[in-house]
Amino acid sequence: MKSNEVVRIAIAETSVIIRGGLTAALKRLPNVKVQPIELLSVEALHDCVRTQCPEMLIVNPAFGNYFDVAKFREEISNRIHLIALVTSFVDASLLGKYDESISIFDDLDILSRKIAGLLNVASEEEMDNQDTLSQREKEIVICVVKGMTNKEIAEKLFLSIHTVITHRRNISKKLQIHSAAGLTIYAIVNKLVTLNEVKGL
């Protein structure tokens, strides 16, 4: 999921203080734009699922006297991530039925990480790391800079040619560099190779 998409998150909680506080916290999440939907009855929850199709439901396990996760999943046709809202002691075996759980004691960072994890949204730190290469990718860059063909790289690193091509595609995507000359500059600047190792200089 892209970080600029709006995510509908329903909050099923009878306490106006907890519900309102969670709504305010969700609006402050750094990597996700949230449209919170506050629900205070079981009827409102069923209407919301039917008409607004939220991507996520944060629900107190005691909501409506007892929130039956299995029954809820059977009744709905679309896939909704279920998050238990823990406001008091809850049996751990009960929490295992949910996709995730949050506590009223969680801070904004924990809440953000859990929501983003369910939505597969990259955090700012992960976004920063998208341009860093793995050790294998660095080895392939070095081989490319030295003028080796895909076949030669595959033989040297004991990989299939298809794997080498896949790595090269991933390298280009990560670095936004689409030429051997560009990779050569990248390799020199990042001290992967020295000038005298580069073929043709």
Image (spheres, helix red, strand yellow):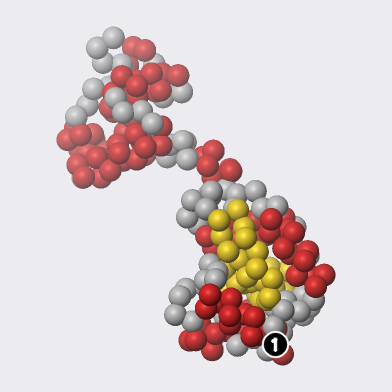
Whole-percent x, y for residue 2 in the image: 49, 51
Question: To which residue does mark 1 refer?
Answer: 64
Front-most of residues 38 and 80: 38
Whether 107 is drawn above or below 82: the answer is above
User: Which is more toward the observer, 49 or 2?
Assistant: 49
Quarter-of-image position of residue 191? top left
* Residue 177 lies in quadrant: top left
Tell me what residue is drawn at x 52 percent, y 78 percent: 50
Q: Position of residue 76 (x, y in %)?
A: 49, 82
Q: Which of these two is toward me, 1 or 40?
A: 40
Dot 1: few (<14), some (14–19), or many (≥20) neighbours within 10 Å? some
Q: Is residue 50 above or below residue 179?
A: below
Element class at badge 1? helix
Residue 115 point in image, percent of width and height: 60, 60
Give amino acid for label 1: Gly
Q: Residue at x 19, y 29 (%)?
A: 149
Instruction: Judge left or right: residue 63 versus residue 52.
Output: right
Q: Position of residue 104 (x, y in %)?
A: 77, 68
Residue 157 left/right relative to 58: left
Residue 115 visible here:
yes
| Residue occupying the point 20% across, 34% down | 150
**Residue at the farthest top position:** 201
Judge left or right: residue 87 versus residue 99.
Answer: right
**Residue at horizontal 64%, vertical 85%?**
43
How many numbered marks have been drawn onto this rendered protein structure? Answer: 1
Q: Residue 118 sits in which quadrant?
A: bottom right
